[in-house]
Image (tube, coloured by chain):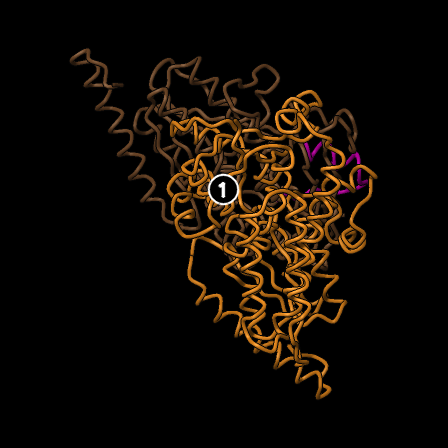
Chain colours: A orange, B brown
Amino acid sequence: MRKITFPHMGNLFIIGKALFEELGFEVVIPPYNNKSALEIGKRLSPEFICLPFKLNMGNFIQAIEMGANTIVIFGGCGPCRFGYYGALEKEILKDLGYDVEMIVIEPLFYGFRNFLERVSKIFARKNIASVLKRVYRLAKKVDGIEKKVHFLRPREMVKGSVDKIYEKFRNEAIKVFGIDQMERLVDTTNVLLDNLYIVNEKVRKIGIVGEIYTIIDSFSSLNIEKILGEMGCEVERNLYISQWIDTHLIYPIFKREDPIVKRYSKDVMPVLIGGHARETISYAKYYATQKYDGILHIFPLTCMPEIIAKSVLNGIRNQINIPVLHVVIDEVDSDVGIKTRLEAFLDLIEARSEKFERGVISWD
Amino acid sequence: MKVGVPNSFCYAGMENFFIRVIPEILEDSQIIFSGKTTKEMIEYGLKNGCDELCIPAKIFIGHVEYLIRKKNVDVLFLPRLVSLLPGTYSCPKIIGIPDIIKTNYCGVELIVPEINLRKKRKIMSEKSMKNEHLFDFPMSKIAKTKNILVLAHSYVIFDEFLNKGILETIKSAGYNPIYPAYYRFNSFYISSDLPKEFFWSSARDIYNYFEWTVNNTQIDGIVYLMTFGCGIDSFLQELIMRKCNKVGLPYLCITVDEHCADVGIQTRIEAYLDMIEWRRKSDEKNNISTYG
């Protein structure tokens, strides 16, 4: 009997669990990303690898201890290091002596037969088309909840009530089975969130851009979204899981491109350099035109594409004329440093907007 | 028109290629190379590069700034090296480096042709684009015994600031350093024991050379020169280290960064070579293998 596991990334486990259970497998979800997962990952991984790799290793070891015997992960052929994750993780687990099967789903670049061979191991039995359609709808709904949480956090009347509901939703999601039950859970959570009392305070809007794992996964971004919400900021970010599905799996079929990326990266970064560097730059430019108060750029230490994005953003900082804070995530697990920096950043935004209101045009 | 070409990072070793290609594209142009890395360039680079960039890229920015400030070039020629072997990509930093220069040095005009051999699509003229003509590096000579394999990207091996004279140190200790040079190898050797072929051109080269030398020559040890913050090295180093453990070869990994003093690295290399020497002696003396 296959017991499938896969790495954590924010709310990915909700979607993955529903999908694999619907396909008839048993699913093992490792504990949420936590200190001990990071500790295991640090011990087993190369020193200069990016943070997601380390957390992946921690997730795998914890899941194997819980009884998982199959790991599913995506591969890649692009210049970003993510494409080689699966291969090296396989090697490390083999050297450690764990007896697990790793199914690395490579893109079609490595041959159609190769792709089918890997995919057929997990998609063998059911009516795939309808399952995938329903999973896609579920992914949209789960991301909808996250967006709602971002909207409500700075506006809630009783502080902490949004997070109470959200935490409960995530904890319940591990217990329920299949897509239907998951959808019902999402619906009830939506109702709970809709019935919260909100107050109309002055809310600042912050756009978050950066590397996909660190902005989606709240543990690795040190709960930045929550901290910002508590400080009275509404957060909007450029990547959600369903959006990843859109841009990487659905748009290529129709040979389309994200319109914002297409429009705003034309003169700055015309070709793909891997990862989400282009998305980072174009959404930063887009947010600057949309009356946002500031931009947070989050990426793990040594992330290759995002370092380029940071350099480019540095170069066009006078052009976009909006405060940008770059946050580099490494293995620190305390959020005090981040809080201090965010406070300073918000103070800057505050001071800047006062100047604007007094009619001073330049703030440098 | 003065065309500036920096000789650093991914463009190291491409001088002959540029001399051949630039007159084809631009008429009456005068090519100005930035030459060897100097202290001045390093200072420019460290001051103006973004903190997280790897050190070769920072030095590259120094080269560019030197060309703009001191040589008054009209235009910079920076081909975008998207892919240098079929089926591979370059490092994202190499692909994106023209964008950094474009946004950070607004006054300068850039010429950015695309070199992309990933799908055998060629943008620049066909004749000049053959792989073996892209890079010119002096090849290393393999001796019969006492070889030390030095692995790194070519722009580290041939930059004296980055490698801190490591080749000289090895030579003066009586060993023969051998090293890979880009794109001399792939036509006849493709590694087989990797879980998955690398999709970076340079990583594929370095790993191929490593595997070929381990299988076909007599080497006493391996030194990996890793640049701080290099994404490719973080994978490559780990896989090579694992292989060395299995084969039983002495392995040393040195991370080079902005530090200017080369004494620390020399000490480590000397200690490492001493260890290899002891090992050889004890091997000869008692005929018991120290390989375990």
Q: Quadrant of the C terminus of chain A?
A: bottom right
Question: Which residues lie in the magenta part?
Answer: B17-33
Q: Secondary structure at mark 1?
A: helix
Whole-percent x, y for residue A316 in the image: 69, 62
Q: Nearer the viewer, residue A28 or A306?
A: A28
Residue beneath disc 1: A56
Residue A344 in view here: yes
Specify whether residue B105 is painted magenta: no
Task: Look at 70% across and 79% down and name the residue there.
Answer: A362
Tell which residue pokes out farthest to the left in this image.
B286
- Give the left or right position of residue A353, taking residue B147 as reference: right
Q: Which residue shows up at 70% across the image and 40% down it?
A: B79
Magenta stretch: includes residue B30: yes
Give the side of residue B259 with respect to residue A138, left or right.
Answer: left
Question: Does A360 sit above or below residue A181?
Answer: below
Q: Name the residue at 63% across, 34% down.
A: A76
Mark 1, other Cα within 10 Å: few <14 / some 14–19 / many ≥20: many
**Amino acid at dot 1:** Asn
Quarter-wise, where is residue A15 in the image? Answer: top right
Give x and y (percent) for residue B60.
Answer: 57, 47
Residue B134 shows in this picture: no
- Across and down, in percent, residue A196 comes to 64, 72
